[in-house]
Image (cartoon, rainbow, N blue to C red):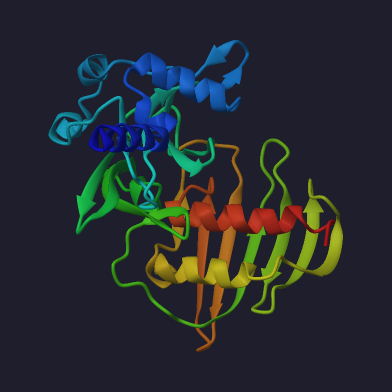
């Protein structure tokens, strides 16, 4: 009798620990789960949808990658290696819309859009296991000035990983170079893009000049949230910013340009011009962090 009671208790405990994502079984359930947990993909009566794997296989040859990698319309995996099951979805919303849904615990989720270009359907992602760690293989367009050369490759294969909860290109041997400042200048665009110049220092001091569409205009000095410089510096070292290309560019027009300059303690610098702010997953994460610093200028 005691054995039966203990077995039932174990089964009940296991069931209670099973997350909502763990319980998803069908594409319809995945779609409903996404719409129940975010309003990001609802606009003008259009909602994110997911085609069947068979239908995607017929539509997306992608140089044989879809079949070779055994791509699914959605998959479960512990993508950020925190012990919880996450989702990788090949969806559609105003074009191709691959995304990751991270389980943050207590029925909260983070939605990470993977697409650099909603008009490009051959952006494919696949969870893989390397030494008991989940990584993500990516087949993505090359947003580099090299693509302007006739006959140049238009796609590349990357391996991505989560570093400090940020999705970046996997680096098994990250650098630890001392950085003395992080400088970002942005241009205007056809729209309301914030145009500003910002420099961040190791003590989290910020020198800011708001030019257009920023919370405040003109010159301001303030402190970013404690640890901001350290976090961004660690990310820059992990992505080996010194050896990234010096120029990136998307294949559409009227977008914004970012000029990122990293000054190292040894006196060297690295400057990257990025039209469209889509150069690499790591660069996108750096821009996002620095734009957050910019947006907080009037709250410090």
* Residue at 40 percent of width and 31 percent of height: 21
* Residue at 33 percent of width and 52 percent of height: 160
Task: Decide if residue 287 is on the left or right side of residue 15.
Answer: right
* Residue at 69 percent of width and 73 percent of height: 204
In this picture, is 252 found above or below 209?
above
Specify the farthest residue to the bottom. Answer: 266
* Residue 74 in picture, x, y percent from top left: 32, 27
The answer to whether residue 220 shows anywhere in this view is yes
Task: Decide if residue 260 is on the left or right side of residue 187.
Answer: left
* Residue 63 in picture, x, y percent from top left: 18, 32
The answer to whether residue 151 shows anywhere in this view is no
Name the one closer to the observer, 185 or 137: 137
Specify the farthest residue to the top. Answer: 45
Residue 60 image-quadrant placement: top left
Name the one closer to the observer, 24 or 174: 24
* Residue at 26 percent of width and 19 percent of height: 56
Q: Quadrant of the C terminus?
A: bottom right
* Residue 156 in picture, x, y percent from top left: 27, 47
Specify the farthest residue to the front. Answer: 1
Q: Quadrant of the N terminus?
A: top left
Name the one closer to the observer, 178 or 79: 79
Residue 206 image-quadrant placement: bottom right
In this picture, is 230 found above or below 5?
below
* Residue 292 in picture, x, y percent from top left: 68, 54
């Amino acid at each position: 009798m005691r054995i039966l009671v203990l077995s039932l208790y174990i089964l009940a405990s296991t069931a209670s620990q099973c997350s909502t994502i763990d319980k998803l079984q069908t594409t319809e359930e995945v779609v409903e789960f996404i719409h129940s947990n975010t309003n990001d993909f609802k606009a003008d009566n259009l909602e994110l949808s997911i085609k069947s794997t068979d239908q995607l296989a017929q539509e997306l040859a992608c140089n044989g990658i879809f079949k070779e990698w055994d791509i699914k319309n959605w998959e479960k995996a512990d993508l950020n290696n925190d012990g919880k099951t996450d989702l990788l979805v090949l969806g559609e919303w105003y074009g191709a819309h691959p995304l990751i849904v991270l389980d943050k615990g207590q029925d909260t989720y983070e939605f990470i859009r993977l697409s650099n270009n909603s008009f490009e359907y051959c952006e494919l992602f696949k969870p893989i296991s390397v030494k008991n760690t989940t990584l993500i293989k990516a087949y993505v367009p090359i947003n580099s000035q090299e693509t302007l050369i006739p006959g140049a490759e238009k796609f590349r294969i990357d391996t991505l990983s989560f570093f400090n909860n940020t999705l970046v290109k996997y680096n098994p041997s990250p650098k630890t170079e001392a950085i003395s400042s992080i400088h970002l200048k942005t241009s205007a665009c056809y729209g309301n893009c914030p145009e500003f110049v910002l420099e961040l220092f190791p003590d989290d001091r910020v020198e800011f000049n708001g030019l257009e569409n920023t919370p405040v205009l003109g010159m301001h000095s303030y402190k970013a949230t404690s640890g901001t410089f350290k976090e961004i510096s660690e990310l820059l070292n992990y992505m080996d910013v010194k050896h990234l290309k010096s120029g990136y560019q998307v294949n559409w027009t009227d977008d914004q340009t970012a000029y990122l300059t990293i000054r190292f303690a040894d006196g060297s610098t690295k400057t990257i011009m990025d039209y469209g702010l889509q150069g690499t997953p790591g660069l996108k994460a750096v821009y996002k962090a620095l734009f957050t610093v910019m947006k907080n200028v009037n709250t410090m």
